[in-house]
Image (spheres, coloured by chain):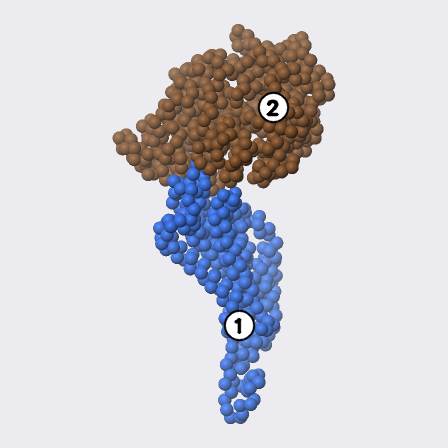
């Protein structure tokens, strides 16, 4: 990626141009060229990618749903936690389907409004995934930069830690850590209200996902930095006495935008799936947090009797993850100089 | 204390969906709430000392074929001494004959003789004599000796080897607290002796009128000392019943074949209609229940003995209704209130506000697996009386927060704090607690629901000094044998507090005396008194009745008429047959 940036920088100054038309404009005339940063090039490419734009639209749509969940629920006149057990028969099956009061119907046994639970359910998925992505990317980038640039013992220790984290059994920890945190933070679970438990579960999930997410990115960044730091512009900066921090964040980081963006855009859907998966297994989020994963887990046995109950959250997760994955692919393609369209 | 195990066993089984009871109403349609509510008949005769084999033929019964039995939960043990769970106890009836047994007549259990008579007690009630029937053989053709019965009793004291079995013998039998079984303490035990070839004598340390009922437990099946291989005995035990082990793979499969040395003329209750049994465990219940409902191929001759999953209920229409087998169960669930900590007026207000309907729905109970309770004794107990429910204790209705608040205001107790433990790691208990909190708060109570982890729940709820005032354990109680004495003295006498098995935490000497007086009566005479006693104790508002357990399982289309065994809440295997 870096050579392209150098070319562009040079091109921007107008002293040199590889544009074919440049030579034909004749001497004396100023060569007008527009330089583009790799980010700009990638964004332009992305903007012309129709699938990417549709997927982005879908993602924004879900983000809006999550942000305006209370408003949407109010519009419907319901909220996600009120029981309507008069709408549930003796066997626990809802007696009403989707109607003007309950747009998606109500859930079995308790009669809570499914539309409200669905819109609120977008929140934990997105918050957990976005926070985990942000935290793990930040840690991964910093550790990768430091390890790759400083080298020596620092690198060895950090690399060892990275390998150690990567070798930990992810799923086992994801299952065990929330229970441990629950015990630590709400003291042997005694007296913890359902909301407290749900909150601890929520944060511990973000913690676990972030803890396991950073190592992969850190290794990637470290590798990139190892090859970059031998480049002339870095050497020049060092010779000039530019402070190390500035070299790291002003010189190196801009050249790492592509791997970071790609990695985060691919990590986001993975975290959404992991969150839902763990919640379905009963070790992620818990009641009364409205979450798609929790709903799917509760709805498994009702798929025949009450299909909407199961399929709405499944559909929500599927569409969101599919859109984000396709978007991630498009972003990678857009940043990859080898992709020509 | 002795009865903890079964309560534990039964509630554990319930958690796995094994209990059941109810009423055979084969024409009930699936969806509407007109489910199986009728059919409770008052028990008549609990004991028939003169019953003789062979057992009466079941009209339409057909011989032959192999019955397949599915369940996700695996019986933890099939050693006769170690059996205490309902599923293994029901299977045991096919293989192990016991001194006495239950015959199910019109859905009600009746105690009848099996290997011995029903026993005779001495004048001081401390010595029981049982006479062994002649000419009983094991499946290998050797004769059953009365010494084998005595040896089995001695073996049941080896609790270090067989930790799961029942423990009444340690409480009631002479030196029962000292003797540690034949492996440790040898064969000399003063509690059991034999004379001649047919007389078994049991010495007690205190009167135990229900001993003949207890003798139905599989731990009393004869075991010859020479064949005892301790823990390994269950892999190929000697059979006395109509079937014997063919092959047994722990945790996955048990195959039974006919025992040709079983003589029907000596057995007053068991049948031998099918040629063999194939128990298949550790298979997903929803899946196998669906298979059984579909009844294609060999699944037509199959039954799943776990209560039907709520998600399959909508399929029970048309001909499929006939595939549902319903029966009574041995348990009552009740949410108790601590009478020491909550005054009577407040208890009445709680009962008035109690959201029975909402809790029923939130807990996912339906009338295939439970029936709304309004008494302590379940219908399977002789003496059960369905009296007019007391105000607020009907077991039905949405609760009346307005009336409850008035009662609370009148008592000057608005804002009274109610506290209880619940399992905050599972969604259903958490939601049930939420429903309860909401309803009680509306009625003017202050509710403190304390969430604990599953692992801590049992310890916390069995501690009567815990800082909560309702919902302590036992949250449900199941009979060890169908008699009021396995309920009232256990749950309501002062000693129940020390045993951790109390409903209401009462220490009332006059109530103790009253219950003792009824317990000392002959079972039939006592049965008549348990109903009024039940009503009297309920009048103390010791808790809100939840439901009686029922059995609602599905059978294949080729399985003949099947009845429930109310002593276990299981299908009565010993009377099952295939239609073709």
Disc 2 is placed on an element classified as loop
Q: Give the left or right position of residue A308, taking residue B576 as reference.
A: left
The CA distance from mark 1 to mark 2 is 80 Å
Left or right of B440? Residue A147 is: right
* Foreground residue among A105 and B233: A105
In the drawing, what numbered circle is on residue B84?
A: none
Closer mark to the observer between disc 1 and disc 2: 2
Q: Residue at x 67, y 20 (%)?
A: B240
Q: Chain of mark 1?
A: A
Q: Nearer the viewer, residue A32 or B271?
A: B271
Which chain is assigned blue?
A
List the residue tagged with mark 2.
B60
Residue B284 is situated, as x and y percent measured from the top left of the image, at 59, 39
Image mark count: 2
Q: Residue at x 38, y 45 (%)?
A: A82
What chain letter is assigned to the residue under label 2?
B
Residue A41, visible in the rendered structure: yes
Q: Residue furthest top?
A: B123
Q: Are marks 1 and 2 on the same chain?
A: no
| Residue matched to label 1 | A45
| Residue drawn at point x = 39 percent, y = 57 percent | A68
Provide residue A300's location: percent of width, then percent of height: 52, 45
Output the letter for the chain in brown: B
Relative to B536, is A164 on the left or the right? right
């Amino acid at each position: 990626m870096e050579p392209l940036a150098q070319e562009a920088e040079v091109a921007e100054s107008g002293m040199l141009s590889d544009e074919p038309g440049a030579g034909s404009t004749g001497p004396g005339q100023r060569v007008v060229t527009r330089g583009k940063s790799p980010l700009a090039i990638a964004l332009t490419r992305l903007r012309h990618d129709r699938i990417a734009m549709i997927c982005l639209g879908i993602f924004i749509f879900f983000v809006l749903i999550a942000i305006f969940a209370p408003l949407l629920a109010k519009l419907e006149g319901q909220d996600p936690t009120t029981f309507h057990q008069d709408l549930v028969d003796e066997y626990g099956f809802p007696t009403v389907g989707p109607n003007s009061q309950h747009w998606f119907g109500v859930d079995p046994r308790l009669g809570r409004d499914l539309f409200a639970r669905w819109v609120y359910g977008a929140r934990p998925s997105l918050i957990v995934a976005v926070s985990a992505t942000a935290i793990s990317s930040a840690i991964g980038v910093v550790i990768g930069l430091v390890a790759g640039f400083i080298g020596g013992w620092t690198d060895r220790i950090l690399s060892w830690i990275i390998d150690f984290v990567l070798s930990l059994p992810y799923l086992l920890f994801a299952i065990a850590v929330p229970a441990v945190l629950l015990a630590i933070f709400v003291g042997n679970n005694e007296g913890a209200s359902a909301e407290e438990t749900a909150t601890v579960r929520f944060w511990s999930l973000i913690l676990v996902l972030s803890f396991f997410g950073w190592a992969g990115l850190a290794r990637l960044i470290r590798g990139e930095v190892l090859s970059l730091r031998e480049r002339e512009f870095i050497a020049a900066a060092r010779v000039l006495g530019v402070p190390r921090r500035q070299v790291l964040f002003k010189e190196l980081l801009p050249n790492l935008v592509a791997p970071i963006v790609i990695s985060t855009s691919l990590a986001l859907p993975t975290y959404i799936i992991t969150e839902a998966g763990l919640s379905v297994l009963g070790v992620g989020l818990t009641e009364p947090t409205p979450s798609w994963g929790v709903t799917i887990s509760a709805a498994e046995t009702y798929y025949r009797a009450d299909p909407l109950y199961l399929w709405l959250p499944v559909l929500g997760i599927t569409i969101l993850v599919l859109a984000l994955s396709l978007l991630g692919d498009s972003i990678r393609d857009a940043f990859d100089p080898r992709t020509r369209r | 204390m002795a009865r903890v195990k079964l309560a534990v066993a039964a509630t554990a089984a319930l958690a796995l969906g094994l209990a059941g009871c109810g009423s055979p109403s084969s024409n009930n349609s699936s969806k509407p709430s007109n489910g199986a509510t009728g059919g409770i008949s008052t028990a008549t005769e609990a004991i028939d000392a003169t019953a003789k084999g062979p057992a009466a033929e079941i009209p339409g019964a057909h011989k032959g074929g192999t019955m397949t039995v599915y369940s996700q939960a695996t019986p933890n043990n099939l050693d006769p001494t170690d059996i205490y769970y309902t599923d293994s106890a029901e299977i045991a009836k096919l293989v192990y004959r016991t001194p006495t047994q239950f015959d199910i007549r019109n859905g009600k259990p009746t105690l009848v003789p099996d290997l011995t008579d029903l026993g005779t007690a001495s004048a001081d009630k401390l010595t029981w004599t049982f006479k062994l029937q002649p000419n009983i053989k094991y499946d290998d053709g050797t004769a059953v000796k009365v010494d084998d019965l005595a040896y089995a009793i001695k073996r049941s004291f080896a609790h270090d080897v067989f930790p799961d079995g029942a423990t009444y013998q340690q409480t009631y039998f002479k030196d029962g607290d000292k003797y540690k079984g034949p492996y440790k303490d040898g064969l000399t035990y003063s509690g059991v002796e034999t004379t001649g070839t047919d007389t078994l004598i049991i010495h007690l340390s205190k009167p135990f009128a229900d001993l003949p009922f207890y003798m139905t437990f599989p731990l009393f099946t004869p075991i010859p000392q020479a064949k005892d291989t301790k823990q390994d005995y269950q892999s190929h035990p000697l059979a006395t019943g109509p079937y014997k082990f063919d092959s047994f793979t722990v945790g996955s499969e048990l195959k039974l074949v006919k025992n040709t040395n079983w003589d029907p003329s000596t057995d007053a209750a068991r049948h031998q209609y099918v040629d063999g049994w194939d128990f298949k465990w550790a298979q997903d219940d929803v899946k196998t229940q669906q298979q059984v409902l579909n009844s294609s191929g060999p699944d037509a001759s199959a039954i799943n003995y776990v209560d039907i999953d709520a998600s399959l209920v909508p399929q029970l229409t048309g001909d499929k209704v006939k595939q549902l087998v319903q029966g009574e169960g041995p348990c009552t669930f009740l949410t108790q209130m601590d009478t020491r900590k909550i005054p009577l007026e407040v208890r009445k207000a709680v009962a008035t506000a109690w959201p029975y309907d909402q809790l029923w729905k939130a807990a996912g109970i339906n009338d295939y697996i439970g029936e709304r309770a309004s008494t302590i004794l379940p219908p399977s107990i002789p003496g059960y009386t369905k009296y007019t429910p007391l105000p607020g204790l009907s077991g039905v209705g949405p609760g009346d927060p307005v009336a409850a608040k008035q009662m609370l205001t009148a008592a000057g107790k608005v804002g009274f704090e109610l506290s209880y433990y619940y399992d905050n790691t599972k969604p259903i208990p958490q939601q049930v607690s939420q429903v309860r909190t909401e309803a009680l708060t509306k009625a003017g109570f202050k509710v403190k629901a304390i969430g604990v982890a599953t692992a801590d729940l049992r310890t916390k709820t069995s501690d009567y000094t815990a800082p909560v005032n309702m919902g302590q354990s036992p949250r449900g109680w199941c009979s060890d044998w169908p008699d009021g004495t396995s309920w009232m003295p256990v749950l309501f006498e002062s000693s129940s507090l020390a045993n951790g098995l109390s409903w209401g935490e009462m220490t009332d000497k006059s109530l103790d005396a009253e219950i003792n007086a009824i317990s000392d009566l002959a079972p039939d005479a006592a049965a008549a008194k348990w109903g009024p006693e039940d009503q009297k104790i309920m009048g103390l508002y010791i808790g809100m009745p939840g439901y009686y357990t029922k059995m609602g399982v599905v059978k294949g289309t080729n399985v003949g008429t099947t009845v429930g065994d109310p002593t276990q809440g299981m299908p009565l295997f010993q009377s099952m047959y295939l239609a073709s």
